[in-house]
Amino acid sequence: MIKKKLKKNKKYNKILITGGSGFLGSHLADELSSSGYKVYILDNKQSSYLKKNQTMVICDLLNRKKIDQIVKNIDVVYHFSAISDISEANKDFVKTVEQNILSTVYLLEACVKYKIKRFIFASSIYVYSEYGGIYRSSKQSCELIIENYAKLKNLKFTILRFGSLYGRRSNNNNFIYNLIHQAIKKKNIIRNGSGDEIRNYIHVIDAAKCCKIILNSKYENSYQILTGSQTTKIKDLMKMVREIFNKKIKITYKKKTNEEHYEITPYSYSPKFANKLSNEDQIDFGQGLIDLAEYISSKNED
Ligand SMILES: NC(=O)c1ccc[n+]([C@@H]2O[C@H](COP(=O)([O-])OP(=O)(O)OC[C@H]3O[C@@H](n4cnc5c(N)ncnc54)[C@H](O)[C@@H]3O)[C@@H](O)[C@H]2O)c1
């Protein structure tokens, strides 16, 4: 458990976040900017959350030449860009290998060339489970490749294995966003599965804080699990959402189970030890759900 509020790490100033226009990357950008780091966001789409003190670089990770120029003056790289949706990744294996693995290798080459002080990678708790298909394989490949760069080319790294994130700026691909969205728009939540599946949810702001904490040098060359402390059965989560909407929501469980996903949070499958990291003042799960419901309601979308 992290107790002290960490100050800016003076060893680092310029920080690049790939995928910084996305859900987690944009929250991390805000977290780092608020601590005084100079944040560069690299993404192939414009960030809707860009702050005045952040620099946006629109670039595809597969553009090696441009990546080389960008990485040149950076201290730390958070590599968060990816095809992050498991179903989308499984639709096109070649694209997933390009976007998730090849782009990582291009980026690693530039990081080694310019002696980047730390390479921080967004992996998943799926990484050594049997689930997640090509998405999981791509994360596992990247972890192994990063280990090669560490051993053979002296790269300093931190691997972050995230559980299920939720919070503002997510979209319908995100499980909790999707179910609250269904509750608001259709007053009926359909769940493919029994509801007995167990998940550890972490609020995206708590995750972003942990991502900042690991800039401390004691997290160099380490593996961290960021799953939060809220272990919840899907059924209980559904009940919480029903309560939030004064029980005016119908919940339907459909028999078809989603085989891409795991039944419980898969610690037991992991052959490689990772430390579990959490910040002290975690956002209360119920409050986090209410906040997300407010956010979705205010977006005015169908
Ligand atoms: N959200 C979760 O619950 C979760 C759980 C485990 C791991 N992760 C990992 O964390 C990271 C961030 O997840 P997220 O939920 O913020 O995803 P996201 O989809 O919201 O963000 C990913 C961003 O990467 C960008 N991107 C993708 N391919 C690119 C390319 N070739 N060049 C430039 N930009 C590109 C996208 O435009 C997007 O803005 C991902 O690597 C994801 O696999 C997320």
Image: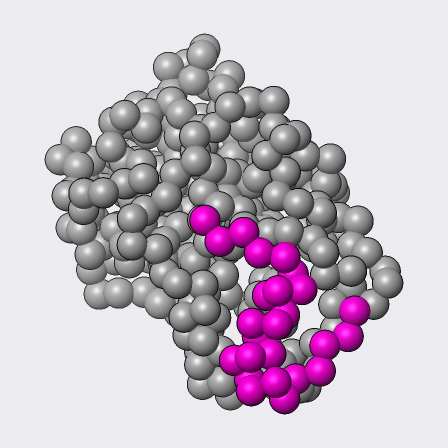
From which residue to which does the magenta span run?
229-253
The answer to whether 233 is drawn above or below residue 77 in the figure is below
Front residue of 252 and 137: 252
**Rendered-image quadrant of the C terminus:** bottom right
Q: From the top left corner, tell me how far across and down residue 225 is, in percent.
A: 47, 37
The answer to whether 63 is drawn above or below residue 145 in the figure is below
Residue located farthest toward the right when viewing the structure as drawn: 255
User: Is residue 238 something one can see in this rendering?
Assistant: yes
Q: From the top left corner, tell me how far across and down residue 291 is, in percent.
A: 41, 74
Q: From the top left corner, tell me how far across and down residue 24 is, in percent.
A: 43, 55
Front residue of 232 and 21: 232
Colouring scheme applied when the structure was drawn: one colour
Say if the magenta span includes residue 235. yes
Residue shown at the point (61%, 22%) measured from the top left: 271
**Rendered-image quadrant of the N terminus:** top left
The quarter of the displayed image where residue 151 is located: top left
Q: From the top left corner, tell me how far across and down residue 43 is, in percent.
A: 44, 53
